Image (tube, rainbow, N blue to C red):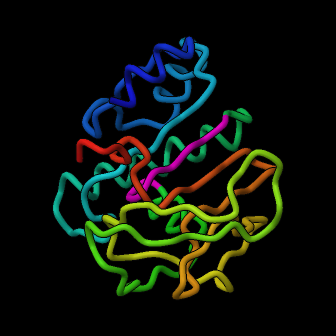
Amino acid sequence: NWLIKLQKNNYNPLILSSYSFNSLKKLEKFCLNNKIKMIVLTGGGDVSSKKSFERKRLKLSFMLIKIALKNKIKLLAICRGAQALLKFYKIKLIKTKLPIKKKIPISLIKKIKGLPKKEFVTCYHNYGVLTGDLKNSFENLYVTYNNTSEVFLNKKSKQIGMMWHPERENKDQ
């Protein structure tokens, strides 16, 4: 469970519901008062859904991205969270046609010490971004065989998007 992993690494996660805050100022004050060092936009759900809950969740994601940018807080966006990050920057999402709940190979684009050149991850998403469509200082880190980005980062704003669920990557799936 990713919450336990965070706690073991001296992070004390605060879980926010999309119904918790309806004001950017209140949410920013909450984040600053609690000395938030990192924001995680989690996976699950559909970023393009018209359902009331999903629209509120997307609004909360956008507010958290704004707060992270303004206050130089690190941001990790996982799967649906990564899609919300792309949507925030008006980067086009496409239907990926990757096999769902199947392992797919991803390849490292540029050599970075300590990162493997190739990984196999389980795909749970229907939407993604073509490698050539990234903009706003985002760069591809890992890509799939169909030219979609599985991991992208923005070093300047300290934001990283991952299109798979690292918390689900274990042999007990």
Q: Nearer the viewer, residue 144 or 84?
A: 144
Residue 96, above or below 113: below
Q: Residue shown at 38%/58% (left/top)?
A: 80
Residue 68 occupies which quadrant of the picture? Answer: top right
Report the side of 56 relative to 28 (left or right). left
Residue 108, above or below 26: below
Residue 121 occupies which quadrant of the picture? Answer: bottom left
Q: Position of residue 110 (x, y in %)?
A: 81, 67
Report the side of 113 relative to 69 (left or right). right
Residue 104, above or below 152: below
Report the side of 106 relative to 52 (left or right). right
Q: Nearer the viewer, residue 59 or 138?
A: 138
Report the side of 167 relative to 137 (left or right). left
Q: Nearer the viewer, residue 133 or 69?
A: 133
Q: Residue shown at 51%/49% (left/top)?
A: 77
Q: Position of residue 105 (x, y in %)?
A: 50, 71
Q: Position of residue 151 (x, y in %)?
A: 59, 62
The stretch drawn in magenta includes residue 162 = no
The stretch drawn in magenta includes residue 77 = yes
**Quadrant location of the N terminus in the rendered image:** top left
Helix, strand or loop for the magenta stretch, by majority: strand
Q: Which residues are magenta?
A: 74-81
